Amino acid sequence: MPGLHRGTWIVVACSEGALILENAGCIRQPDLRLIDRMDAPNTPPPDTRRALPEVTDRSRLATSAFAAMVVGRLAREAARGGAQRLVLAASPPLLGAIRDRLDDDLRQRVVLTLPKTLTKQPLGRIVTVVNSALENAA
């Protein structure tokens, strides 16, 4: 049965930060609980005297560093036997950076990836979007 199983971890992330949530409910009545809130590392504001490629590189490096933080957090939980099922929802550049850093163990735990920014959405909306995507993927 497709849906948000009990114990599934949902990572919603954007350039500003990430929420790691867990479904403490069941498929029919999901109940998302906050496991962790992560803030993205601050990058200094761009120097307007510098060339545009340097600003882009700085942004890409910040995305890469934040992706590494998120994956590190997931890897620590996986090493303790948790986070057996993962849903990853992030802005496309960040989602790509996260996927690039997943080891084989974490990659096997991923049941869904969503190239969407859901960090500012209420929990009910996150459940709706994730469940809809899980149903469409089945």
Image (cartoon, helix red, strand yellow):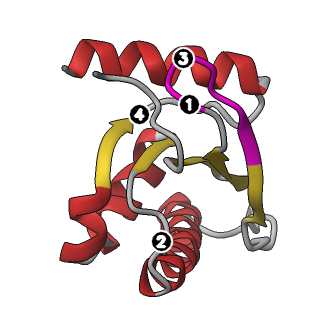
Image quadrant holding the N terminus, namely: top left
Seen in the picture, residue 9 relative to 134 is either above or below; the reply is below
Q: Is residue 9 left or right of residue 88?
A: right
Measuring from the top left, give residue 29's x and y in whole percent: 63, 20
Tell me, for residue 28, which label it has, or none: 3
Tell me, for residue 26, which label it has, or none: 1
Q: Which residue is mark 2?
A: 64
Sequence-first disc among 2 and 1: 1
Q: Is residue 64 left or right of residue 59?
A: left
In which quadrant of the rendered view does residue 63 lie? bottom right
Sequence-first disc among 3 and 4: 3
At label 3, which amino acid type do we have? Arg
Q: Which residue is mark 4?
A: 115
At label 4, which amino acid type do we have? Pro
Q: Nearer the viewer, mark 1 or mark 4?
A: 1
The span picked out in magenta is: 26-33
Q: Nearer the viewer, mark 2 or mark 3?
A: 3
Mark pair 2, 3: CA separation: 36 Å
Measuring from the top left, give residue 47's x and y in whole percent: 76, 68
